[in-house]
Image (cartoon, rainbow, N blue to C red):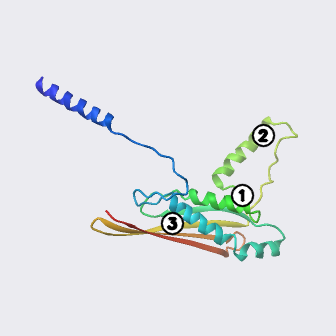
Amino acid sequence: MKRTIVIAATVLAMISLGACATRTVQRVDETQQVDLSGRWNDTDSRLVADEMISDSLTRVWITDFAEAKGKKPTVIVGLVGNKTHELINTETFTKDLERAFINSGKVKVVQAAGTRDELRGERADQQKYASPETMKNWGREKGADFMLQGTVNSIVDEYKNDKVVYYQVDLELSDLETNEKVWIGDKKIKKLVKN
């Protein structure tokens, strides 16, 4: 009985100490660099997006294609593999790149596989349930001229409590008809984490 009372008192003390702990949350500007863990974060994603956008939109692949074909190139985003030691959501920078392509007015972007399936499902539903004048037809999708693919790699060098983390993001744009690589972009990020 005495032991039960001691355990109960200990649990209550731990709960009240936890309740007294304060946590603050503060809104900060989305471009402000905040590094807590030393792992990949929003700043790294933004640095990659900025580099890839400025590099890809100023290279000759766009004008070469437009001059040869008489139209804007159409791009589809394929797999950007994560080969790092941590979880990295590559969509945080590929979506920025897609947005920049579209907003530049120089490049068109088509949906990738997963989203295409959802669109096709909606189109199939329209064949049954939509009025003939609003129903969308099959076989009208735009084919991509180029596919964007890439990898994110990392190297970690540790000694005692300190470490250096090196990230390298490589993106490649390939002509879907010829398999020719028309653009390669890369961004390297190196972090020193001291404990």
Tag 2 residue: 126
- Based on the displayed image, in which of its 4 quarters is residue 103 positioned? bottom right
Tag 1 residue: 110
- Based on the displayed image, in which of its 4 quarters is residue 5 positioned? top left
Q: Residue at x 71, y 47 (%)?
A: 119
In the drawing, what numbered circle is on residue 152?
Answer: 3
Q: Are marks 2 and 1 in contact (CB under 8 Å)?
A: no
Left or right relative to 154: residue 134: right
Residue 157 point in image, percent of width and height: 35, 71
Q: What amino acid type is highlighted by mark number 2?
A: Gln
Q: What amino acid type is highlighted by mark number 3?
A: Val
Taking depth in this image into account, of 17 and 146 the one nearest to the observer is 17
> In this view of the protein, can residue 13 be seen by the observer?
yes
- Based on the displayed image, in which of its 4 quarters is residue 46 positioned? bottom right
Q: CA–CA distance between discs 2 and 1?
A: 21 Å
Residue 61 point in image, percent of width and height: 72, 74
Q: Residue at x 41, y 56 (%)?
A: 36
Q: Are marks 3 and 2 in contact (CB under 8 Å)?
A: no
Q: Quadrant of the C terminus?
A: bottom left
Circle 2 Cα neighbour tier, 10 Å, few/some/many (<14 / 14–19 / ≥20): some
Lower position in the chain sequence, tag 1 or tag 3:
1
Lower position in the chain sequence, tag 3 or tag 2:
2
Q: What amino acid type is highlighted by mark number 1?
A: Val
Lower position in the chain sequence, tag 2 or tag 1:
1
Residue 184 point in image, percent of width and height: 61, 74
Q: Helix, strand, or loop for circle 3?
A: strand
Asked if residue 189 is positioned above or below residue 41 in the image, the reply reads below
Q: CA–CA distance between discs 1 and 3?
A: 23 Å
Q: Nearer the viewer, mark 3 or mark 2?
A: 3
Asked if residue 52 is positioned above or below residue 87 in the image, the reply reads below
Residue, far right: 133
